[in-house]
Amino acid sequence: MKTDLSGRVAIITGSSSGVGAATARLLGGMGCRIVINYAHSEEPAKVVAAECEALGAEVLICRADVSDDKDCKNLVNEVMNTWGKIDILINYAGTTKFVEHKNLAGLDKEDFLNIYGVNVIGPFQMVRAAESALRKSSAGSIVNVASIAGVRGVGSSIAYAASKGALLTMTQSLARVMGPEVRVNAICPGFIQGEWLKKGIGTDNYERIRSSYENAAPLNLTCTAEDVAESIVAFAVGHGVTTGQYLILDGGHYLT
């Protein structure tokens, strides 16, 4: 895998925290020019930008809600006006609603529309907006961040699982049409350690589920944000003959 990415430009949606932020730091440390994107959290985005700059990266901060097509186009235009190219697009921005799967009444049409708007339509709109620039790159690559939820139908809600399943199907469709210039792949993390999940399900549930997953998984591990970022970057700048694939990251828990 190429480790000197000097001159390449990477857009990472939802990169003000968590996996997106870890990916920005990793790519920034490899010399990549980094586009930090946020929808609401400007101050955390500035913190991540400063961390990337401390690693020697050039950084651009862009506010955009990926569910808004105009925002996606404006983000891409801002990047092109600044650096004139896009080599890597990482679709990490996502949302959910925490509802037990058996509680069908806990989800309504608006929940599905909101979740699909960010998790499925958002990545499509970002790819469409960046298509021309990515095709002109000599190393165009897209990585969609899906979830084990999209493979097994588990996770924070049925709507979330369905959206991630749709994202995996879309990854295959995009891989067919974006080739030969651009590779399109996805990763499917399982339980990811961090404050976002802890806040969503509560500290006690978080620790209980984490312990259960780690005890059951063959590797006795759950993911950190840095673990997921490593696999995103591997797909983004390595695996040159691979497209339309997804990688499960869960310590082997899916085998159980």
Image (cartoon, rainbow, N blue to C red):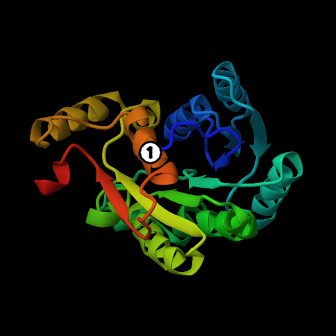
Name the residue: 58% across, 51% down: 93
Q: Is residue 144 above or below residue 21?
A: below
What quarter of the picture does the N terminus occupy? top left
Residue 243 image offset from top left, x and y in percent: 44, 68
Q: Is residue 217 above or below residue 140?
A: above
Say what secondary structure mark 1 lies in.
Answer: loop
Residue lying farthest to the right in this orientation: 81
Left/right of residue 215 with respect to residue 120 in the rendered view: left
Name the residue: 33% across, 57% down: 247
Left/right of residue 3 with respect to residue 103 in the rendered view: right
Residue lying farthest to the top in this orientation: 54
Q: Observer-nearest residue: 206 or 3? A: 3
Asked if residue 186 can be seen in this view, the reply is yes
Quadrant in the picture for residue 58: top right
Q: Observer-nearest residue: 230 or 64? A: 230
Residue 65 image offset from top left, x and y in percent: 71, 54
Crowd around label 1: few <14 · some 14–19 · many ≥20 (10 Å)? few
Residue 191 image offset from top left, x and y in percent: 31, 43
Q: Is residue 178 above or below residue 11?
A: below
Residue 171 image offset from top left, x and y in percent: 48, 70
Residue type at mark 1? Met
Q: Which residue is mark 1?
A: 1
Name the residue: 75% across, 60% down: 72
Asked if residue 116 can be seen in this view, the reply is no
Q: Observer-nearest residue: 54 or 119? A: 54
Quadrant in the picture for residue 43: top right
Name the residue: 17% across, 36% down: 214
In this rendering, the count of numbered labels is 1
